[in-house]
Image (spheres, grey):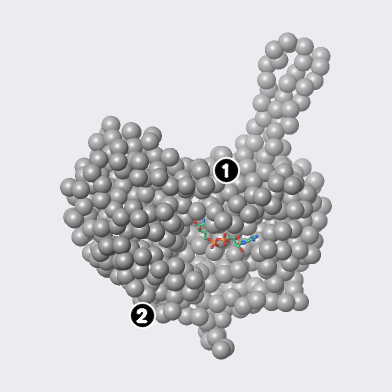
């Protein structure tokens, strides 16, 4: 069956929607191409090249050739190019948001927010480029000088997911370029157009073509080349834990530096001394942003006995007011899920919960807005044997578990192989410190449902991965230390 064709996006600058990959400074069409569809309507947006190992090798070779010159440029010069790129992103923010909403589905307001969030990484790392300090170390024997230099690691690669099609790229390419490394990006198959629009703007900003390349196509063959080619010295991956483990193994033979931002299973704890309205607002932000498709989304709500019923009632009332529909339409607050597989997974998780005694308070079924829509859902009386106690939901479903004391909830919250983000709401200051310290997570949000920005370190522990993005630590991922010992 032919899919409907999306009416052309009303872009101010239609050349930003580029149906070509960007390799070695050239826009290439590729012999084979694949289609990209709008998840809200099923309509065709366009086609991009289905590239593989050969074009990826070409990208790596050109990046290698560009590295010596780029690393020698003054940090100020690299920073100026990044800032020009950031300015172009902000000047074209509306078009970037339209492209993202068309291919990813998120409401336009969220897409606009992501454009500024993505641009903030270029801004931040342009500044950090100027602060890659080394160290002089007092010699224990005083007969030599010891100096530690911090140098760019070399050619870098990034494999990125579809849920934040711009920001997951700029928070990797920003620090790489800032410290002197070229970067090759393989975007997710669902969202190549946002990545390619970034490449159009990078080219316009005057960033040499070999420094930021976008290779669209087959994940296995592009990923195979990026991980096995010894010239690539660093891989930064954001995506599922399953793919992350595979790439980790694939990088072992060439001993690449890695950062992995993987899945999560965030607990969201509401203690009985919490500000209930603030907790509900935080729960909405954390769970339903991007239709629940973020790695830091609350996955398990734990609410203390005394306030359990009141929380469920207020939360379900607020969730019932979310406006589901095509992200491009005004006032919509929840778009579609990314594809039919995501709907099937969420449907199965809800069925499992119902079978085991879960009580659907609101939602609980696909939404009539279209094939990829699911109604925002709250499930009370959630139990530890339900699948979502262990599995990442990645959809708009909020299971609410009951707990009675602090020790119990900390044990439950930490009882997962993941360790990305955790949230809790409480007022007692002693409790706030104890719980913050006891949660085994890379990020803990206290009395808020939103915490990510360019200045704070983002990343997980356990099987949620390692490495930190954003913040001053973000540049470390793209640097190596060279020690100089000079006699005399
Ligand atoms: P995914 O792992 O399937 O895909 C992520 C990227 O990896 C895509 O570009 C995909 O094409 C690529 N990929 C898939 N198989 C590959 C292979 N064999 N070789 C090379 N590349 C391959 O994940 P997804 O479905 O796109 O994203 C959802 C998952 O990502 C969720 O589990 C979520 O928690 C996680 N995620 C984590 C973060 C984070 O910062 N920790 C952010 C966003 C998403």
Q: Earlier in the sequence, mark 1 or mark 2?
A: 2
Is 394 on the left or on the right of 7, as rendered? left
| In this view, 29 is above or below 215 | below
Do residues under tags 1 and 2 come within 8 Å of each other at their CB atoms?
no
Near mark 1 (Cα within 10 A), the count class, few <14, some 14-19 or many ≥20, is some
Q: Which residue is mark 1?
A: 467
Q: Which of the labelled discs sits on residue 368, or is there none?
A: 2
Q: Quadrant of ligand 1?
A: bottom right
> Ligand 1: does it lie within 8 Å of the C-beta at label 2?
no
Is 134 on the left or on the right of 335, as rendered? right
Q: How many labels, in total? A: 2
| In this view, 55 is above or below 208 | below
Residue located 51% across and 76% down the image = 38
What SS does tag 1 mark? loop
Near mark 2 (Cα within 10 A), the count class, few <14, some 14-19 or many ≥20, is few
Quarter of the picture containing the C terminus is top right
Q: Position of residue 218 (x, y in %)?
A: 68, 67
Distance between mark 1 and mark 2 Cα atoms:
41 Å
Residue occupying the far bottom of the picture = 1
Residue located 38% across and 36% down the image = 438
Is 92 on the left or on the right of 223, as rendered? left
- Give the image quarter of residue 145: top right
Residue located 44% across and 57% down the image = 392
What SS does tag 2 mark? loop
Q: Which of the labelled discs sits on residue 207, or is there none?
A: none
- For the question of whether residue 187 can be seen, the reply is yes
Q: Position of residue 352 (x, y in %)?
A: 36, 65
| In this view, 94 is above or below 314 | below
Residue located 41% across and 64% down the image = 395
Q: Position of residue 341 (x, y in %)?
A: 49, 71
Q: Position of residue 225 (x, y in %)?
A: 74, 58
């Amino acid at each position: 069956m032919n899919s409907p064709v999306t009416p052309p996006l009303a872009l101010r600058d239609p050349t930003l929607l580029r149906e070509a990959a960007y390799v070695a400074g050239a826009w290439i069409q590729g012999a084979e191409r694949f289609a990209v569809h709008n998840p809200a309507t099923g309509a065709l947006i366009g086609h991009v090249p289905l590239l593989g190992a050969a074009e990826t090798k070409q990208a790596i070779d050109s990046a290698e050739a560009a590295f010596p010159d780029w690393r020698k440029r003054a940090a100020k010069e690299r920073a100026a190019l990044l800032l020009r790129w950031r300015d172009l992103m902000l000047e074209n923010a509306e078009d970037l948001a339209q492209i993202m909403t068309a291919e990813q589905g998120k409401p336009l307001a969220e897409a606009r927010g992501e454009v500024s969030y993505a641009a903030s990484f270029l801004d931040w790392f342009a500044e950090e480029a100027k602060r890659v300090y080394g160290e002089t170390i007092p010699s224990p024997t005083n007969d030599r000088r010891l100096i530690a230099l911090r140098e760019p690691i070399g050619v870098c690669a990034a494999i990125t997911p579809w849920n934040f099609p711009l920001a997951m790229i700029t928070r990797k390419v920003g620090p790489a370029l800032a410290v002197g490394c070229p970067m090759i990006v393989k975007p997710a198959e669902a969202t190549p157009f946002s990545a390619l629009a970034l490449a159009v703007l990078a080219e316009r900003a005057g960033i040499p073509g070999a420094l930021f390349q976008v290779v669209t196509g087959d994940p296995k063959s592009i990923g195979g080349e990026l991980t096995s080619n010894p010239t690539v010295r660093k891989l930064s991956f954001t995506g599922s834990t399953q793919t992350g483990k595979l790439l980790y193994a694939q990088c072992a033979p060439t001993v690449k530096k890695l950062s992995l931002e993987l899945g999560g299973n965030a607990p969201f704890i509401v203690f009985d001394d919490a500000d209930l309205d603030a907790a509900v607002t935080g729960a909405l932000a954390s769970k339903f942003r991007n239709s629940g498709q973020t790695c830091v989304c609350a996955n398990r709500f734990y609410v203390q006995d005394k306030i359990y019923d009141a929380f469920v009632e207020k939360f379900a009332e607020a969730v019932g007011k979310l406006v589901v529909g095509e992200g491009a339409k005004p006032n919509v607050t929840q778009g579609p899920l990314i594809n039919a597989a995501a709907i099937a997974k969420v449907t199965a998780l809800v069925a499992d919960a119902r079978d085991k005694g879960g009580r659907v308070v609101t939602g609980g079924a696909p939404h009539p807005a279209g094939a990829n829509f699911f109604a925002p859902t709250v499930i009370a009386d959630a139990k530890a044997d339900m699948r979502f106690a262990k599995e990442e939901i990645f959809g708009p479903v909020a299971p609410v578990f009951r707990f009675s004391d602090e020790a119990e909830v900390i044990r439950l919250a930490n009882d997962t192989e993941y360790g990305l983000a955790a949230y809790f709401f409480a007022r007692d200051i002693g409790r706030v410190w104890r719980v913050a310290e006891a949660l085994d997570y890379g990020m803990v949000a206290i009395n808020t449902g939103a915490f990510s920005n360019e200045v704070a370190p983002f990343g997980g522990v356990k099987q949620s991965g390692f490495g930190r993005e954003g913040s001053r630590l973000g540049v470390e991922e793209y640097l190596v230390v060279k020690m100089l010992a000079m006699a005399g």
